[in-house]
Amino acid sequence: MDDLKEKTADLADHVEDLANTFYKLTVVKITQKATNIASNLLLVLSITIIGFLIILFVGVALALWLGDVVGSRAGGFLITAGIFGIVLLIIAGIRKKIVFPYIRNLIIRKIYD
């Protein structure tokens, strides 16, 4: 009878150790996923800000140059705004077929990576 109690106690200890190990492994995996998501978010945010600044300065430079070509600064800015408007319409037109699936697949790939 003592042998059975001892084996039962050992089994309970092993189950408890296994549960603790599983818990710790789960915490480590969740922490790793959260860290990966946070670092990717920071990278995307940095790239977005830098990209926005590049587009802003290129747009201003294009507007000033077109203003000199046309002979009117306001005309150069209007032409540049028109170009950006056309680009915006193109992106809005392809968003459901190309942009949204690309972003969705990128997010899913990052979650299961």
Image (spheres, rainbow, N blue to C red):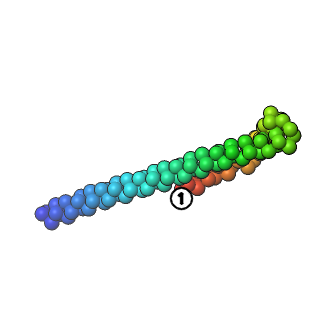
Would you call the spot at circle 1 few (<14 residues within 10 Å), some (14-19), or many (20 or more)? few
Quick check: can you spot residue 34?
Answer: yes
Query: In this picture, is 86 found above or below 98?
Result: above
Q: Amino acid at mark 1?
A: Asp
Closest to the observer, 43 or 10: 43
Q: Quadrant of residue 85?
A: top right
Query: In this picture, is 95 found above or below 6?
Result: above
Residue drawn at x 66%, y 48% is 54
The residue under label 1 is: 113
Residue drawn at x 56%, y 47% is 45
Closest to the observer, 89 or 95: 89
Q: Position of residue 56 (x, y in %)?
A: 68, 43
Quadrant in which the N terminus is drawn: bottom left
Q: Position of residue 105 (x, y in %)?
A: 63, 52
32 vs 112, left or right, is: left
Q: Quadrant of residue 77?
A: top right
Residue drawn at x 27%, y 57% is 16
Residue drawn at x 54%, y 52% is 43
Closest to the observer, 12 or 4: 12
Query: In this picture, is 36 found above or below 57?
Result: below
**Local secondary structure at mark 1:** loop
